[in-house]
Amino acid sequence: MSNKFTILGCGSSLGAPWITNYWGKLNKKNKKNLRSRCCAHIKYKNMSILIDTSPDIKEQIKKNNIKDIDAVVYTHDHADQTVGIFELRPFFWKNKKKIPVYGSKKTINSLKQKYTFCFLPRSGYKPIMKSHVFKEKFKIRKDKNYFKMIGIELQHGLIKANGFVFNKIAYLSDCNKIPKKTLKYLKNLDYLIIDCLRINPHPSHFNYNEALEVAYKLKAKKTILTNLHVDLDYGKLKRKLPRNIVPAYDGLSFSF
């Protein structure tokens, strides 16, 4: 049984196309430009782990034939990473146990405030989540198996977000700066999945040139650009990027 990482969604906060059917500079004939919001899935042994719960999580889970969810880890508390949390209720009903949720102290407190009904009894409804504030290094357990992760701190505009490092893979979906103290965890990577919002600079995300600068510095065997805005066309990116750096698309997966 191979372990697998899947990018469920690689779009920016509005996805592509926007609700107004605006495609920007994207070639609408290329299905890899059809992007749901950022989210990822880890299959490790008998474990099924989500990174974030995007507004599109229901369709992402169905499209990728994910049958169960054993835990969720959150990068930060913004709506495009969290609002799909309530869609996970059927997994609670199916398994008859709370779903473990991991995040920084700030993220967990925010989730409890915004989605109180998921964590505390409300109006006769049972809570479906059990919260865990992770330290830098933590383990997710199921039966006799466990999955080790490192939650690294990133700068995301005015807030701190988290990226996750595991099995020589780094997932850094929302950031515009990587603190020096974090760099020690980003050496000798097989895969780097990194925020690359758009061509022009942005106050809380790496733009194209900044993402490439980080990629060249970290020298992962393969870099995947994610959180893509509507000015970054898949085909054009694929043609001009070096072979070891590729744009993400929904459903992109690899074994590890």
Image (cartoon, rainbow, N blue to C red):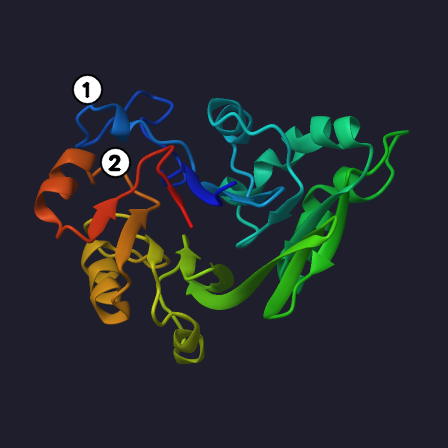
**What residue sits right under mark 1 in the picture?**
29
Q: Residue furthest left?
A: 240
Query: 153 above or below 225?
Result: below
Disc 2 and disc 1: Cα gap in Å?
14 Å
The residue nearer to you, when weighing 87 against 136, is: 136
Q: Earlier in the sequence, mark 2 or mark 1?
A: 1
Q: Which residue is rendered at x = 54% and y = 64% of the image? A: 151
In this rendering, position of residue 189 left or right of residue 86: left
What amino acid does circle 2 point to? Val
Task: Locate residue 238 relative to residue 88 in the image: left or right.
Answer: left
Amino acid tagged 1: Lys
Disc 2 is placed on an element classified as loop
Residue 156, by quadrant, is bottom left
Name the residue at the right extreme: 124
> In this rendering, does residue 135 appear at all?
yes
| Front-lying residue, 215 or 56 | 215
Q: x, y (%) of residue 45?
A: 58, 45
Label disc, if present, on residue 118 of the rendered structure: none
Query: Does dot 1 land on a helix, a strand or a loop?
Result: loop
| Badge number at residue 230 | 2
